[in-house]
Image (cartoon, rainbow, N blue to C red):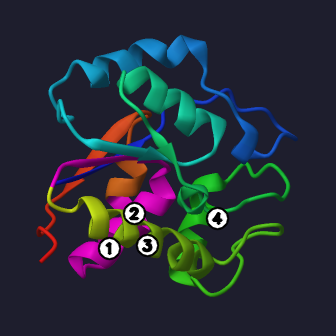
Amino acid sequence: MLHLVRHGRPLMTAGEPAARWELDPAGFDDVWALRTSGRLPERAAWFCSPEPKAVQTAQLLTEGEVGVLPDLREHERSGEWLEDFRGAVRRAFARPDEPAAAGWEPLSACRDRVVPAVRRVLAVHGAEDVVLVGHGTAWTLVVAELTGQPPDLLRWESLAMPDVLTVPTAPAA
């Protein structure tokens, strides 16, 4: 099984790129609750995005080794702080080949980076449980690609911080 974990709640700072946000210590209990929830396997291959909030979430979720994979980083958004973030993400999904806001990469570029990275991990570890710690938008793209379904924006909007999406995988032949 593939377990896609959305990172815990970050300390959001206007003017600071989201890719540099740390975890909010006030949300550590939520990460610990996920760790003890039984929703994640006891034994798995663990990997995470290089973003601090993802690395810190992974470190709180497991005592084991966690590989950091640069291609698992979130949909790049280096522009201005957006009050209507959800609306911008919805625009990104509606027109994935265009930036949804100034400073945002097209969502298709995120998909073209993240999905192959996940497939490479599964090619090596697909016969065992895999836990990837990263980001909601990226995981929404991955689930759509792996299941052949359109991106589930209602599920994206309902993801907690942290949360987990589980996708069955076929063992590598």
Q: Mark 3 points at which residue?
A: 115
Q: Mark 2 is on which residue type?
A: Thr
Q: Which of marks 3 and 1 is nearer the N terminus?
A: 3
Indicate whether 99 appears above or below 50.
below
Q: Name the residue under label 1.
A: 144
**Do the CB atoms of the residues marked 2 and 1 lie less than 8 Å apart?**
yes
- Tell me the element at label 2: helix
Alpha carbon of mark 4 to alpha carbon of mark 3: how far?
21 Å
Mark 1 surroundings within 10 Å by alpha-carbon count, few (fewer than 14), some (14 through 19), many (20 or more): some
Mark 2 surroundings within 10 Å by alpha-carbon count, few (fewer than 14), some (14 through 19), many (20 or more): many
* Comparing labels 4 and 1, the label whose residue is closer to the camera: 1
Q: Name the residue under label 2.
A: 140
Alpha carbon of mark 4 to alpha carbon of mark 1: how far?
19 Å
Q: Find residue 9 and report its horizontal and vertical position in percent.
A: 53, 29
**Which image quadrant: the C terminus?**
bottom left
Q: Mark 3 is on which residue type?
A: Val
Alpha carbon of mark 2 to alpha carbon of mark 1: how far?
6 Å
Q: Mark 1 is on which residue type?
A: Ala
Q: Earlier in the sequence, mark 3 or mark 2?
A: 3
Question: Which numbered circle lies on residue 88?
Answer: 4
Picture quadrant where residue 80 is located: bottom right
* Comparing labels 4 and 2, the label whose residue is closer to the camera: 2
Picture quadrant where residue 168 is located: bottom left
Q: Find residue 33 and report its horizontal and vertical position in percent.
A: 30, 17
Alpha carbon of mark 3 to alpha carbon of mark 1: how far?
10 Å
**Do the CB atoms of the residues marked 3 and 2 lie less than 8 Å apart?**
no
